Amino acid sequence: MKVRPRHLIAALALAMLPLTACAPGSSSPAADKAAGTNASGCTSPETLKVWSWRPEDVAAYKKIFTSYEEKNCVKVDFQAFKNTEYNQILSTGLTGSNGPDVVQARAYGALQPLIVGGNLTDITGKVEGLDGMDKTIVTGAQGKADGKTYGVPFATQTMQVFYNKKIFKDEGVEVPTSWDDFIKVNEKIQGSGMTPLAVGAKDAWMMPFIHDIFGSAEYGGKDFRDGVQTGKKTFTDAKYVSSIQNLKDLQGFMPKDVVGASYTDAQVLFTNEQAAMFPGGSFELGFFQKQNPELDLGVFQVPVRSTSASQQPVSAAYADGNWAINAKSPKQEASLKLLQWMASKEFGQHVVDDLKQFSPVAGVTFNDPVMKEIWDLYQKSPAPYTLLVDFRYGTPSGTDLMGSGVQELFLGSKDAAGVAQKVQDGVSQWFKPTS
Amino acid sequence: MVQADQLSRPKPRKRSPRPAGTALGWPATVIFLAPAVIIFAVFVLLPMITAFSYSFFDWQGTARGAFSGIENFFTLFTAEPFKSDLPRALMHNLLLFAGAMVFQNTVGLAIASFLYKRKRFKKLFQTLYTLPYLVSPLVIGYLWTLLLSPLFGPVNALLKAIGLGELAQPWLGQPSTALWVIVLVTAWQWLGFPILLYGAALGGIPEELTEAASLDGATAWQRFRSITLPLLTSAIGTVSILTFIGSMEALALPYAMGGSTGSPAGATDVLSLMFYRTAFESGASNAIGVSSALATMMFIFIFGVALAFTSIIRRRERKLS
């Protein structure tokens, strides 16, 4: 076959197309064009590129940032990427030129690689709103080694038990106020053939969550956490072991073969009203309400035993992520201004109303009754979700160890003391208490 | 692109100075090869070389620190969780390979030998068997997870309905069955591939050979044993090597069925999941260093074994010809 050179060159050009299309650093023409004017009608606004891992929230964020543009000569170019690929995209974007200006970054341990890599701008003392936030949450935005602040936390997640009010009413049970009551509620519901606790232990990441929901008050919440930090306590302490034993005691009220049941299975059980309670994070609320708008939801904190280390039921909590500034961004001033706004009550209220998330900004109000209930419980007696908040700064992480540990507990290959030992041995490889 | 016009201008025909056997001259060859070579270099070779170099450094997030020699490799064998995860994950990969090999070279070969002589429905069955191979392993994995769910899964429901309730298991929820389920699903998903390959290889065996053998009084088994099987050596070799590479790199299916931690309690952990956790989920500041070391070792192991395999197969082939 005779090949015409003209065709050859055309083919070559075509083959090169995808290469040029994905070349790094090529800015999209749409973004540049948008710089012409902003919501306030300001003629030459500065464009701030904002990156996020929440494609599902793009519409809500666009609306939120419009209210910022109306008062500032800034155009916010909001881009969202797939959650599971975000870490990779972000670290590439922060190292290259022409990257984003303001980014959504993870919290606590997962934030550290960006901090030690020098990718984020130090904002210590420059954002007023941070002073009013819970310390556990702000810690999530700080460098472990230097103690400096690198971000504005954007959401708090709290952990508690969701319950189906209708099922409770039908079974004639009330929200339990003591551990024995709690067991009785479970037995009553089980007696009717329903699953009391919707738990799926196939997904290991969910296990440290349920451990803290059922065990935080048992091991003493913040006091225990402070004890471990200063070396006065370890994970093999009797109270920590009994907090793990709590899960074993409750296994009979979870679905049969709980290690084979997935997290999604548990969600389905609860939203289909086949299970009465769901121990989970506040992030479940939106999903539950969307899946089954008829669901009459309530929340409670797991009651304590008379022997529990803390005699006050608690809601464990952690920060979900932070807004931070790309250290390489040439627009540091405008970025900082945006971050300051993100720590304001106005932005916080947007997060609550438009995103249905718990803004850590002080003074926001909740219109959704369940959200309000969750927040009030948390305000009354908070506790740090210590395995995530303090023990994700090294490998193996506290949450990973507890995740597979609880699976082993449910399978019967380890007892509560064995799981506690596993967590202690694992984290002591890299964790050194500060005395 | 000045040359475009000159090149496209018709020229008087003259005898080509090219040596016989070369279809195109050098410039054309280069132009034809360039896209593939460039794509290979940019997307395969370059990342491989960089991963290799990364594994010798200490990392602080995305900032490269000091040269650390084989420190990262050392970590893999001395520090938890790698020390106990690595041998277990490797063992699981090898079991995946063994399971897939046994299944493909018995069931796969049997189906292929059965199908290649059929005239009717051959295409239909080939398509049916190949279908799972064409679907993403992630989709396959999630589908099987749903089918095997102890709460809502139809598999256990069916067993109970036909009175075999005691056989109903939390298939993916206990270490004794979880890995074998993944081995079987992997083998099942890949089944179409050996069927196609063996089908083609069987079609290539000259009929005179088997005909002559049967005239000499060879039984069906003798014909298969002494003629068909030896002539399939290269196909079996290809299938084995690709299966080996596939099972050593298995990620999507174990991820979909056991999550990134290889639930339950690490019973379905494989090397790629270990790499995934170390690189993207650990939050350790030296994640890039250690995970690159793991990736490098995986590559060397897979490449080495595949090379050894190939040379053995080549030797056997030479003996036959």
Image (cartoon, coloured by chain):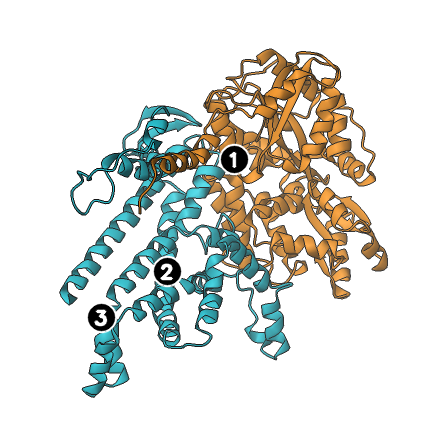
Chain under numbered label 3: B
Residue that carries the numbered disc 1 in the rendered image:
A392
Chain under numbered label 1: A
- Cβ–Cβ under 8 Å for marks 2 and 3: no
Mark 3 crowdedness (10 Å alpha carbons): few <14, some 14-19, many ≥20: some
Q: Is residue B108 left or right of residue A188?
A: left
Answer with the quarter of the image where residue B106 lies.
bottom left
Mark in front: 2 vs 3: 3
Q: Residue at x 69, y 55 (%)?
A: A268
Q: Is residue B41 left or right of residue B163?
A: left
Which residue is at the front of the view, A48 or B113? B113
Q: Is residue A157 left or right of residue B83?
A: right
- The mark nearer the N terminus, 2 or 3, is 2
Q: Is residue B296 visible?
A: yes
**Above or below, A21 relative to A101:** below
Q: Colour of chain B?
A: cyan
Which secondary structure, mark 3?
A: helix
Give the CA distance from mark 2 to mark 1.
32 Å
Q: Amino acid at mark 1?
A: Arg
Q: Colour of chain A?
A: orange
Mark in front: 3 vs 1: 3
Chain under numbered label 2: B
- Give x and y (percent) for residue A333: 60, 11
**Above or below, A193 relative to A81:** below
Q: Amino acid at mark 2?
A: Leu
**In the rendered image, which quarter contains the N terminus of chain B?**
top left
Which residue is at the front of the view, A263 or A381? A263
Q: Amino acid at mark 3?
A: Pro
Residue that carries the numbered disc 3 in the rendered image:
B230
Which residue is at the front of the view, A52 or A234? A52
Q: Residue at x 31, y 70 (%)?
A: B203
